[in-house]
Amino acid sequence: MEDFIETVADRRLQAQLMHAIQGRGVFRRFKDVLFTHPDERERWFAFSTARLRERMLAWLEEEGIEVVTKAREDVKPLIDREEEHRP
């Protein structure tokens, strides 16, 4: 959260977010502050998702697990059939 806060251009919002991550209930307060700033809230979700992806890829690499970035052609028909049956 601190890394994200450093990317926020609005100094007032940045200060509110820094205050929100002090003490207990950090995640709730952080989200509450972002709730009134929808553009920054969306940026937070994208930032958080990207960071999580980076960490997962690093862990997989450390474990010697090869990352497959797209479905293999022999698996794609199974994926397509599964999507047809989703409500």
Image (tube, rainbow, N blue to C red):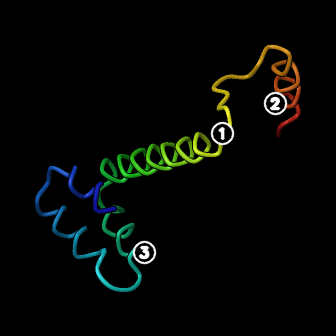
Q: Amino acid at mark 2?
A: Glu
- Residue positioned 39% across, 66% down in the render: 31
Q: Which residue is mark 3?
A: 28
Q: Quadrant of the C terminus?
A: top right
Q: Which residue is mark 2?
A: 83
Q: Classify mark 1: residues with Cα within 10 Å, few (<14), some (14-19) or many (20+).
A: few
Relative height, residue 23 to residue 52 (above, below): below
- Which tag, 2 or 1, sits closer to the chain's start? 1
Secondary structure under badge 3? helix
Q: Classify mark 2: residues with Cα within 10 Å, few (<14), some (14-19) or many (20+).
A: few
- Residue positioned 81% across, 30% down in the render: 83
Give whichever of 34, 49 is nearer the camera: 49
Q: Quadrant of the N terminus?
A: bottom left
Q: CA distance from mark 3 to mark 1?
A: 36 Å
- Residue positioned 42% across, 72% down in the render: 27
Residue 44's disc is: none
Secondary structure under badge 1? loop
In the rendered image, residue 18, in percent from the top left (x then y), is placed at 22, 70
Badge nearest the viewer, 3 or 1: 1
Q: CA distance from mark 2 to mark 1?
A: 31 Å
The number of callouts visible is: 3
Q: Amino acid at mark 3?
A: Arg
Give whichever of 8, 38 is nearer the camera: 8
- Residue positioned 58% across, 45% down in the render: 62
Q: Which residue is mark 1?
A: 64
